[in-house]
Amino acid sequence: MVLSTLAFSTLALSIATAVQAVDAPTFDPTRLSADVKTLSSDAFEGRGPATEGETKTVDYVVGQLKAAGLQPGGDLKNGKRAWTQAVPLLRAEIVGTPVLTLKIDGKNRSLTQGNEIAVRAPLNGSKGVAIANAPLVFVGYGVTAPERQWDDFKGVDLHGKIAVVLINDPDFETGVGDFGGKAMTYYGRWTYKFEEAARRGAVGMLIVHETEPASYGWATVKNSNTNTMFDVVRDHPSAVHPQLEGWIQRDLAVELFKHAGLDFDALKKQAQTREFKPVTLTGESFSAKYSVDAGVITSHNIVGRLEGSKRPDETVIYSAHWDHLGVGEPDAKGDRIYNGAVDNGTGTAALIELARAFAKAPRPERSIVFLNVTAEEKGLLGSEYYASKPLYALGKTVGVLNMDALDPHGPARNFTISGSAKLDLLDQLTATAKKWNLTYSPDPKPEAGHFFRSDHFPFAKRGVPAISFGSGNDWEDGGTAAGKASEDEYTANHYHQPSDEWQASWAFTGMARDLQILYTLGSDLANSDSWPNWSKDSEFRAARDASAAERK
């Protein structure tokens, strides 16, 4: 039998994995628990970028990487590397209480921020928002996809108007169609929809929230959009951000449609077809007025590095985000600190533990970078900044193994990744995991768009093989029933809420075992000369192939 180059490479890596699996270091659940407990304590104030919480987080993580024996891998300063990469960000915060008003048939109705509406501080550089009686236009899913012969706008003029749009893709309700069925495409992400509103000249956009297609409840929308906003510094921010970006509750949308003589559910079904045409909500308009405290601040990615012994210019990256939502609106108990224990104290603790393990091992042939990025919760901004201004060439970056919101309970029999991408890196991870009798389970909720919601994505869209590891849901103790129940309970009651706090009952034994797998894969990559790639039909393959000359 003749093996292809890729098959031979995968086989060689599998053989190496079989040998190294036995030698993988053990990881201490107690130390993982201690790191998560510290990082998610109230003293760290929810780890908000450009706050005292950031200062404490950077100091803590850098201290752990130093103690482990890593070298600084960040910005060059006077010929020496720093421990951080400076990330300039536009910071915007609404001053006071925004005045938000609907006019329906000549009568004004006030809306309460965080209740039936959640508007974001503008990221177009403005110091305030002043919108008076802007007409409302329903534009379906807000998608322009020429390659799918799809256009929800049909030439409608949105200048001076507010676009009202559905969340997710046109395929979500039926599971079939031109947008990947249940699996979300980038057209389903709210970031795309706001960008398209700006391109269309709309003064603003309001996304109709529904829990199932959004994959999270209103509490997550409120907590993620009514606090301080950030974006990378752009030359022309208004090109991607309309003046007003916000969400409204489904019940409010249904009411607005009814007052305009329209049926929300009927129009939603129409929006799932190419024939849909924009509809004006007759007799209704929207006004908004509030001041904005905006300016450029500097946050930081944390970067530790182990230099390769033979090919130091070739790099394997482990990544995780250190930030969470900081201090925000109080919950029912009055708690205002969004501690972020699972999201992403777990990933940061895992990154530290991996660094400790690699620092004790023989020096790898390729370099390994431990990248703890900022502002993931604000739109993957830290990873986007690194990927756009890489400290180490992306063309010679072997792959990215990202860790986000790992399960702090006991071990599972399976693992997953964010999204359903096809790439060699996943094949290699699957082969490695088999040594611990773990099986790969595809993303159980591809409709949630997780592929676009973790820090591997800015690397992936530039061609770098990248995955975000996800804990399994088939628990050794309780099976899939227990695993799914725990996941659902976390999403409903703790995700992006102050209650995402460290629990003494968490065993961390599952994470400790999963880190053995991630360590082994990273070690194999760092001690080989293979270059994983995307599948031939992947939208990211062309970008990777374009940098092939750098790897010769």
Image (tube, helix red, strand yellow):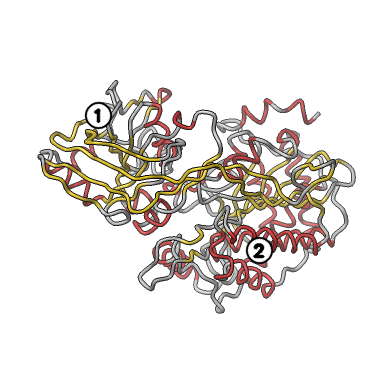
The x, y position of residue 423, in whole percent, is 62, 40
**Amino acid type at mark 1:** Phe
Image point (27%, 23%), residue name: 156
Pick whichever, 8 or 218, lies toward us: 218
Q: Residue furthest bottom?
A: 504
Q: Horizontal and vertical percent for residue 294? A: 48, 43
Secondary element type, mark 2: helix
Q: Classify the position of the N terminus by image quarter.
A: top right
Residue bearing mark 2: 349
Residue 250 falls left or right of residue 283: right
The image's mark for residue 201 is none
Task: Indicate the secondary structure of the residue bearing disc 1.
Answer: loop
Q: Residue 1: tell me if it is visible.
A: no
Q: Residue at x 55, y 70 (%)?
A: 42
Name the image quarter holding residue 344.
bottom right
**In the rendered image, which quarter contains the C terminus?**
top right
Q: Quadrant of residue 508?
A: bottom right
Q: Position of residue 544 (x, y in %)?
A: 66, 31
- Left or right of 150 in this view: 307: right
Q: Earlier in the sequence, mark 1 or mark 2?
A: 1
**What residue sits 33% from the left and 25% below the top?**
151
Depth check: give the residue in front, 295 or 48: 295
CA distance separating discs 1 and 2: 48 Å
Q: Is residue 255 visible?
A: yes
**Which quarter of the picture shows residue 30?**
bottom right
The x and y percentages for residue 447 are 41, 47
Residue under label 1: 276
Residue type for callout 2? Ala
Circles 1, 2 touching at the beta carbon (< 8 Å) = no
Foreground pick, 294 / 30: 294
